[in-house]
């Protein structure tokens, strides 16, 4: 099941890459970010942000993801670091990103962060007919009847 549920997570994130990001060593709440995904890089993704953002210093981090249909949830752990490779910064640059920076790609406040993934816990909410029946009738539900759940390495 691990490969199956990982594939579902990546597909869901590709169509809706908005996540919440927090640093483990900070007491601050998570903040919304848009992940820059690469179909060939399944162990990392990136975020454009600005210098001074509370994520700037990086460190152990956690990303929370909920699919657009609210049928897949993931908590992804890893390490957030400044991305300094110009080819990566340029690779994901687009008009949507440019809209956030007064001076475009040359904005001195531009900062890109790389999230190197370590592991994730993924839940797929798919109760099936039996689970829906139990939900509607108030009968006791076995957690296995609500969908898949797995802890995976990334």
Image (spheres, helix red, strand yellow):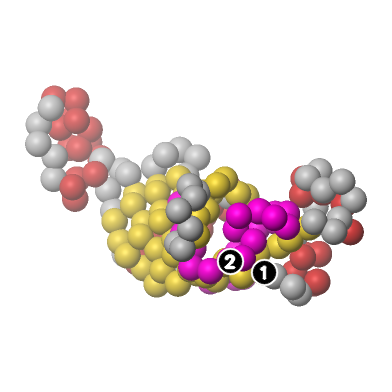
Residue 45 position, x and y percent, is 60, 64
Start-end of magenta stretch? 38-64
| Secondary structure beneath label 2 | loop
Residue 13 position, x and y percent, is 53, 52
Residue drawn at x 15%, y 32% is: 134
Q: Return the residue at label 1.
A: 82
Q: Return the residue at label 2.
A: 58
Q: Is residue 1 above or below residue 84?
A: above
Q: In this view, does 25 lie above or below 66?
A: below
Q: In the displayed structure, does residue 19 sit left or right of residue 51?
A: left
- Tag 1 near tag 2, CB within 8 Å: yes
User: In which quadrant is the C terminus drawn?
Assistant: bottom left
Which one is earlier in the sequence, the residue at label 1 or at label 2? 2
Residue drawn at x 57%, y 45% is: 32
Q: In the displayed structure, does residue 5 sit left or right of residue 52?
A: left
Residue drawn at x 60%, y 49% is: 33
Q: Which of 84 and 136 is in front in this view?
A: 84
The magenta stretch spans residue 52: yes
The numbered dot on residue 142 is none
The magenta stretch spans residue 127: no
Any part of residue 10 in sight: yes
Any part of residue 35 in sight: no
Residue 41 position, x and y percent, is 60, 70
């Amino acid at each position: 099941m691990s490969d199956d549920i990982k594939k579902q997570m990546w597909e869901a994130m590709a169509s809706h890459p908005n996540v919440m990001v927090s640093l483990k060593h900070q007491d601050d709440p998570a903040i919304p970010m848009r992940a820059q995904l690469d179909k060939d890089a399944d162990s990392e993704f990136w975020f454009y942000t600005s210098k001074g953002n509370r994520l700037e210093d990086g460190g152990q981090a956690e990303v929370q993801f909920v699919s657009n249909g609210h049928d897949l949830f993931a908590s992804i752990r890893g390490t957030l670091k400044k991305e300094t490779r110009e080819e990566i910064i340029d690779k994901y640059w687009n008009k949507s990103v440019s809209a956030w920076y007064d001076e475009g790609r040359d904005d001195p406040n531009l900062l890109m962060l790389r999230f190197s993934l370590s592991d994730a816990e993924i839940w797929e909410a798919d109760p099936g007919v039996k689970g829906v029946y139990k939900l509607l009738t108030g009968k006791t539900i076995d957690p296995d009847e609500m969908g898949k759940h797995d802890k995976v390495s990334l």
